[in-house]
Image (tube, helix red, strand yellow):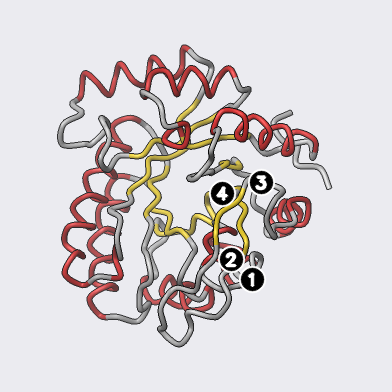
Amino acid sequence: MSASRARIGMSIADLRMPAQEAIQQAARLGYQTIEIATVGTEFEPRRFGETARRHLRRFVADQNLEIAALQVDIGGQRFGNPSRLDEGVDHARSAIEMAAQMHVPIVTIELGPVVPDSAQLVEAMRRLAQRTDATGTFLALQTGYTDPNQLAELLRTLGAPTIKVCYDPAGLLLGGFEAFSGVGPLADQIILAYVRDAIAGRGSQADGGRAPLGRETALGDGELDLAQYVASLHEANYHGPLIVRRLQAMNPVVELAQARQRLASLGAGM
């Protein structure tokens, strides 16, 4: 299967170096597009003003890169903690406004271990949908510790055309699910795809239990069949960028270079 339509991207936060240097390094590694984290970084929307945003767009373009998405991850239990829902909504709303101003199409959010039919969660997502609808920005919910079928049901409940999915196979593996288990139920909702590998957690989050143990690995060292994953995305009519993620690398530059090469060997980035 050819992935020739897919651009290869990465999250600059995974390089764990100053942002400007990370952007330049992403370009040197041959990446074509990037994701930028906004929580706990210099790109926090409340502190990263209009002039800085214009300069960032110009600097990224000067490296022959594009910004695929902004990312929101408040850490901890994230949206799974009812006491932090307002905090999560505030961060996401600020990122949505910033993305709209910078002409970035997507904001991704890490939901954490949520109860998809929670009235509080549904209301929080509806509040965010008002902003995405108003700005024309997409909000992509990352797959992970929530059953993909339940996540699909949440999206149906919301009925918001600008609320979609960021597919993370490693997030599903770490949550005790099969890496491809969400491609079917979420096929028409995937607007961004991560490329991340892991050794699976053992168990399931469907019963609301604690997260089973698993661990992220370098691409190719875990349980993700990369060729099958890319083929599954293609069958789901996903033709967007493939965003490499590696949160826990010992040597991020080396591992991210190798990951890009693996994707290129499948025809991506051509």
The answer to whether the residues at label 1 and label 4 have Cβ atoms under 8 Å apart is no
Residue in the foreground of this view, choosing between 157 and 124:
124
Mark 2–mark 3 Cα distance, whole angstroms, equals: 13 Å
Mark 3–mark 4 Cα distance, whole angstroms, equals: 11 Å
Q: Residue furthest right?
A: 1
Mark closer to the observer (1, 3):
3
The type of residue carrying mark 1 is Glu
The type of residue carrying mark 3 is Leu
Label ID, residue 178: 1
| Mark 2, residue position | 173
Neighbours of disc 2 within 10 Å: few (<14), some (14-19), many (20+):
many
Q: Tell me which numbered mark, 2 or 3, is placed earlier along the sequence.
A: 2
Q: Tell me which numbered mark, 2 or 4, is placed earlier along the sequence.
A: 2
Residue 263 picture quarter: top right
The type of residue carrying mark 4 is Tyr
Mark closer to the observer (1, 4):
1
Neighbours of disc 1 within 10 Å: few (<14), some (14-19), many (20+):
some
The residue drawn where x is 53% and y is 40% is 249
